[in-house]
Image: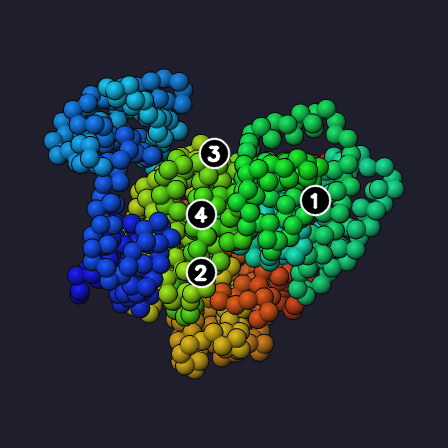
Amino acid sequence: MTEARDLLQRLAHAYGVQPSYRGHDGHEHPVSDHTLTTVLAALGCTVEPDGTAGLEAALERRRLAPWRRVLPHTTVTHEGSGSSVQVHVPHGSSVTVVALLESGEARPLEQLEDFTDPQDIDGELIGQATFRLPRDLPVGWHRLGARVEDGNEVEAALVVTPERLTTADPYRHRRGWGLSVQLYSARSSASWGLGDLRDLAELAVQTAEHGGDYVLSNPLHATAPEPPVVSSPYSPSTRRFINPMYLRIEDLAEYAALDPRARREVDALAAARQADNATAESLDRNATTAAKLTALRRLHQVTPTPERARAYRTYREQEGQGLEDFALWCALRSACGATDPAWRDPELTPGGRLAERYRHDLAEDVDFHRWMQWLCDTQLATAQQTAREAGMRLGLMQDLAVGADRNNADAWMLQDQLVASMSVGAPPDMYNQRGQDWSQSPWHPERLVETGYRAYRDMLRSVLRHAGGIRVDHILGLFRLWWIPVSQSPTEGAYVTYDHEAMIGILALEAERAGAVVVGEDLGTFEPWVQDYLAHRGLLGTSILWFEQEAGRPRPPQDYRVQCLSSVNTHDLPPTAGYLAGTHLDLRERLELVTGDPHAERDRAGAERRAFLQAVVEAGFLSAEAASALALGSGGSLDPAVVADVVVALHRFLAQAPSMLHGIALVDAVGERRIQNQPGTQQHEYPNWEIPLADATGRAVLIDDLDAVPGFARLLDAVHHELNPGSPPDRQPGRGIPAR
């Protein structure tokens, strides 16, 4: 290795950029010098990869950076740790440090001996003093205050997080289960062509009647404020706010207050969209969004009652500037479009002169988008209340996407905290051999620290407010993210690390305060210690049946982790019936996503399927005849009744795992075969996230009719019985959502 290469790698490490990574094949893969320098430049360190002097100077600047500040921008610790803080002041100066608690109390810090040599910073000798944080500091969002001998006073953020999250502890003694659903696809007869928050509440009630503890939905994050909208719920415009597409118009008080003519107009919009509820063809998000926006603009004109006006004001005060800026972005996007050159004006940024002028000129439209967020918040609160009152222990489990689309609301509102020149994705793996680019801007690690993690905290608080649980998609992204220079291939990326103690700790703090369980999706390429760390902090991991293998053999369910949510499949895999039929193999071949030999891929998949079926047979949950019938069939030749038997058997087999939570995909309960999302494809290749719920025959299934679908009650009751032998679900079919 050349001296310059060694220096470049050391500099990359200093900035948290990993110069190599271990791939899914078990081999170490080096990151090119070009990628390293590009990523470093995005982090604010521009160097030439072969310039030895420049690399050495950059390393020295990095080493001395903490010495240029009296206090660290943010100190994150966990309760009882008694950790220390380094303070930097002119050499020989005295300094005192106190913890300013959110309760208003001030706690002095004890100074420790520190014999670190002073450093020359721009011609001035700077010394270092070390202070110990009191071990009994309460969890919360506090401040550190330092007073230097020369009269200089400085404050910085101090966050004390729980040592471990305790919200999942009850499920160690009595395991829980729930249903996972892509909400937009799960429609009722009253839906406007897409599932909504009323449908979510109804589904929670039906699941509770079979003994279920939660319903996990796709991310409900907001997308573009008007059509065309992005189909993927995992590519939102912001993660903090909700998509108004999920509102049930008829449940709003303003709908009830409409005059007869206006109500007829809104009802006509509803009827036009409800006509699509019976089709199993691709969903039409744009049509539903357009219809609901038209209706909501009519409702926005209704004079609110004093009670609702007060509630709206309270919501605005609670959400603060973040809500104001999001509503402004929505109004600007509607007025200017996505590609208007005005977006490049430096004054059209939050707080900029031009932005404030638009805030005034577009005041009515800004209020419309702000008001819709309040409606979403109230309907989500009602859905969670309904789920809990129906007997669910958790209720709603929200899904948190990895990030937001690179060219949307978060990119505008948080442009000083996100890295616009980079996109988040994943390196190649067995299932996505070309890697993945999710077109999302990553957090800038240092900007998070400099701002006290406020944007991250505020986003978590919004998502957790009406949730009994939260699933964090790709939770490994709180440890490191695969950064891809924009316009480059996903194979040309590098991992950038984050302060996981801070990211996980803040997540645990906000979840503990919200009383919510945290499930981390910890699948994919990761370092072995990560899962142990998550368990130590009280977070649950994720186990997927098909991924649980040892030396090519299914891992016995009894050997699964306790602290995890186990399920047979996930939204990036086909429903179990489709997996058994090999529909994913047909699709990947048709879309040319298989980089190796397709026949070898089919042989591997067939061997995997036979191994799992044999394990289920040996466990006593499936007859050898049924397994043989499935192994001999393929695709459309498979007997739906046999497939249904195997799906139930696989879930019963999985239920032997000691996992604290178990999950059932709604698609498995109705016999659906089509995959909802095929990673590595665009909409013109496959209708990702536009597949409505259908049964084994391809007929659309509405949630009104779920109990009439033979497999629905059978699968739910089978899992409940395995997890709670001798304890039938407390069915109360009369329970439901109270009238408006």
Contact check, label 1 and label 2, Cβ < 8 Å: no
Question: Residue at point 64% right, 52% down?
Answer: 337
Contact check, label 4 and label 1, Cβ < 8 Å: no
Q: Quadrant of the C terminus?
A: top right
Contact check, label 2 and label 4, Cβ < 8 Å: no
Instruction: Name which of mark 2 and mark 4 comes first in the sequence.
Output: 4
The residue identified by callout 2 is 486
The type of residue carrying mark 2 is Val
The type of residue carrying mark 3 is Ala
Which numbered circle lies on residue 514?
3
Q: Position of residue 576 (x, y in %)?
A: 51, 65
Question: Residue at point 63% right, 55% down?
Answer: 229
Whether residue 570 appears in this view of the structure is no
Q: Quadrant of the N terminus?
A: bottom left
Which numbered circle lies on residue 248?
1
Q: Position of residue 561 (x, y in %)?
A: 34, 51
Measure the C-alpha gap from mark 2 to mark 3: 37 Å
The type of residue carrying mark 1 is Arg
Instruction: Name which of mark 2 and mark 3 comes first in the sequence.
Output: 2
Secondary structure category for the residue under label 1: loop
Measure the C-alpha gap from mark 4 to mark 3: 26 Å
Rate crowding at label 2 as few (under 14), some (14 to 19) or many (20 or more) other CA atoms within 10 Å: some
The front one of 278 and 73 is 73
Answer with the quarter of the image where residue 656 lies.
bottom left
Contact check, label 2 and label 3, Cβ < 8 Å: no
The residue identified by callout 4 is 418
Question: Residue at point 36% right, 30% down?
Answer: 157
Instruction: Name which of mark 4 and mark 3 comes first in the sequence.
Output: 4
Secondary structure category for the residue under label 2: loop
Where 368 sits versus 11, above or below? above
Instruction: Name which of mark 4 and mark 1 comes first in the sequence.
Output: 1
